[in-house]
Image: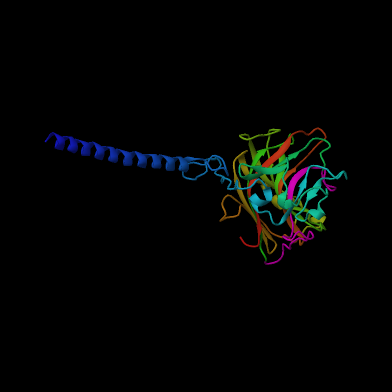
Amino acid sequence: MNYNKFFSLYIIIFSLYFIYSCSSDSDTELSENQEQVTTKPEGGDDTDTNGNNGDQDGGNDGDGTANSDIPYEVLELKNWKITLPRDFDNDNLADEIYLDENRNDYSEDPSFKKYKDEFFFVENGNVRFSCPTENGTPTTGNSSNTRSELREMPSNGDGETGWDATTNTIKTLSIKVRVIQTSSTSKFAFAQIHDFKQNIWDDLLRIQIQSDIPNAKEGDTGRIYILGDVTEGRASEGFPVDFRSLNYSDRYIKNNYILGNWLTFKVTVQNSVLKIYLDDMSTPIRTYDNITCKSNYFKAGVYNQSIKSTSTGNGIAEFSEIIVSENF
């Protein structure tokens, strides 16, 4: 009898231990899953546990990938070259890096497919552009402003032909960007459209940051605004309409932008109409008609504005998406 009581007690204790162990394992697994859900993704900041953006202005988080430290691979930059604020070939001009390394200004630079440096690199799964403004920083032959900036190229790397804004083919630039800081000039362009032949049209479009604070940094405020021929071109200069009188007062598209917050842009050009979408991809925030230039290309990165001999600091922007396509 005593043996039977002892055996029954043993069975009860063993059963309780088994139930507790299963429950404990289940709780541990749930805790690990919860930790995975609440971990902030590397591709952007201020994202809550539901994947929504916590920025005050409602911008989208970045979605870059941390699988590579090469900008070309992170953003799949198949249709670009880059201009950099350095002069390794000593020709007094900013260097350019191409898909075909045989075209590089400096012969020791690798192909753009493998390139990275202090002005163009991967940071937290996104691609960061940094460009100084100090006196003596190399720039291009037709500008006194400095740049660390992509220029749209054919995907095979040959030539620098442009596209026609007047045809039925839609040309689209999609970017996700956040401004990290400005130089002492308080402004730079992070997206552009230029005309390759520059007969009348030159800089068709510049989308810029402008702050009232020199050397503005994350957390400071600024404005996003539109410049270029669509707001500055005059009929007396050969443009089809007087863009300045029509659009110049309407150039600001986002006030109280907080540096560090993500913005989503889409720019489309088709049948002589340019449309700009900001965050809301269903309704353009600006539409410009009479766009008759025929040799255009997109640009993206950091193109500092209004540089003087006394300017200091770097313009810095971070991109999680830069896509050129022929669809919306």
Q: Is residue 243 visible?
A: no
Q: Position of residue 160 (x, y in %)?
A: 78, 59
Q: Work out whether residue 129 or residue 295 is closer to the camera in this orientation and state it.
A: 129
Q: Position of residue 68 (x, y in %)?
A: 63, 47
312 lies left or right of 288: right
Residue 306: quadrant of the picture: top right
Q: Residue furthest right?
A: 91
* Residue located 22% across and 36% down the image: 10
* Residue located 82% across and 45% down the image: 94
Q: Work out whether residue 98 or residue 237 is closer to the camera in this orientation and state it.
A: 98
In the picture shown, does residue 167 fall above or below 21? below
Q: Is residue 256 magenta?
A: no
In the rendered image, which quarter contains the C terminus? bottom right
* The residue stretch that appears in magenta: 139-168
In the rendered image, which quarter contains the N terminus? top left
Q: Decide whether the magenta segment is chiefly helix, strand or loop.
A: loop
